[in-house]
Image (cartoon, coloured by chain):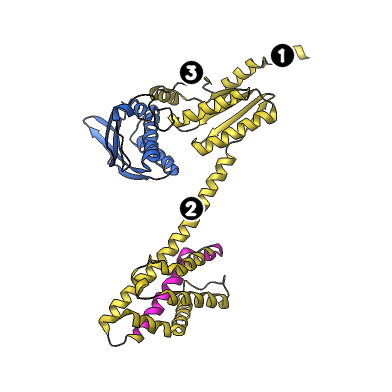
Chain colours: A blue, B yellow
Amino acid sequence: MPMTIKENMAIQQERDLVYCRNRVKEIAAKIGMGIVNQTKLITATSEIARNMLRYAGGGNVKVEVITRGKLEGLQLVFEDSGPGIPDINKAMQDGFTTGNTLGLGLPGAKRLVNEFAIQSVVGKGTTVKILKWKNG
Amino acid sequence: MEQDIIDGLKLKKDQVLEQWLKDQAEASDYSNNFNTNEELEGQSAELVDILLSTLNEDTLNNFSSGDLEPLTDYISSLTISRARQGFSPRETATYIFTLKDALIKVLGEIVAGEPTKLYSVTLKISKFIDNIGILSFETFITGREDVISQQSDEMAELSTPVIRVWNGILAMPIIGTLDSARTQIVMENLLQGIVDTGSSIAILDISGVPAVDSLVAQHLIKTVNATRLMGAECIISGIRPEIAQTVVHLGIDLSQMITKATLESALKYAFNTLQLEVRRIDKNKAN
């Protein structure tokens, strides 16, 4: 039986990241996601949410359990109203960073999930949508 | 128009205070033995004084006005001192909201016979006191948040012990999330531990870290590099299968580091490096 879980979390400080990660892990465990996929999902969550906090000063995360045919999974939408990303292709390259980090956050997160979509308007904000199937 | 009424209230200050004290005594929730009666009366008189002296037509309609600063400051310090004395937020709120009752009762006498006027002023006064109540709540919560963040700092400090497992071998189990502030503490404690004990091998056990993302990995790499600069070797242990897979997918290169799945294998490696051997004693031979 598919569950209907829809949640909204605000990311405004480092502490919120911990809560967000734990909550995503809880929901993932509830729908029966395996430990490896759980870890991949919370790592991707952590990357994107931290980017949001660092570069946009915070934002919102929407978590939703979705089903598509026989597939069941978790969809997360990260929304911020920060400065936006001028060149998404560049931001999605391994090793590209403007913040003196490893530059693996976005491309790494993309590799950890099943579906990944990013939209950004300079001066308006960025939206990242990720999806991880339970057994994907 | 409102100014007249406010002036009227100011003239009847003593009556407001008297009514308020009476209401406080009547509110059953509010019979506390923390404060002596004189203390309570003094505090209440002071609050009525500040309230009525800052209240005017402008501030009544605009709670964020700068002129209200003496009042907001007083409410904040009152809330904090009451919280310290052990009053519950409910008691402090009741204390503030009984003032509303007293004010409205006195208002009724001042504006007797003009229901519409009384109604509009009552609404405004009521909103004003509500704002004071909200301010008190906010102060209370901010106070609590300060305590929480203080405690989490203390926890970060406490939960990163450096253990000397053998002569020359240090171990540091990390439990919980490894953020920037925490890494700083971990690194400081570890490097200091290396100096203090003259150890040449440090084992950083991350079994208790829920997820290794690129920032945590970066912190680990920095810690290992710093340890190397001190002339010691750093082993990362406790890499669980799911963490290993995630790190590979993320594309983080940890191949420059010595990593082990368990603390046990890290310890074995350390013994090997120090050319130590752990052996079972053959009891027959010993006898």
B55 vs B180: above or below: below
Image location (x, y in percent) of residue B133: 41, 67
Say above or below: B61 vs A45.
below
Secondary structure state at the residue bearing disc 3? loop
Asked which secondary structure carries label 1, the reply is loop
Q: Is residue A68 left or right of residue B204?
A: left
Q: Earlier in the sequence, mark 3 or mark 2?
A: 2
Query: Disc 3 and disc 2: Cα gap in Å?
Result: 41 Å
Amino acid type of the residue tagged 3 in the rendering? Ser
On the image, which quarter does residue A13 sit in?
A: top left
Residue found at x 45% / y 75%: B27
Is there CB contact under 8 Å for labels 3 and 2? no
Q: Quadrant of the C terminus of chain B?
A: top right
Q: Which residues are magenta?
A: B81-108
Q: Which residue is mark 2?
A: B145
- Residue B199 rendering spot, x and y as whole percentages: 67, 25
Residue B255 tag number: 3
SS of the residue under disc 2:
helix
1 and 2 marks in contact (CB < 8 Å): no
- Residue pointed to by mark 1: B282
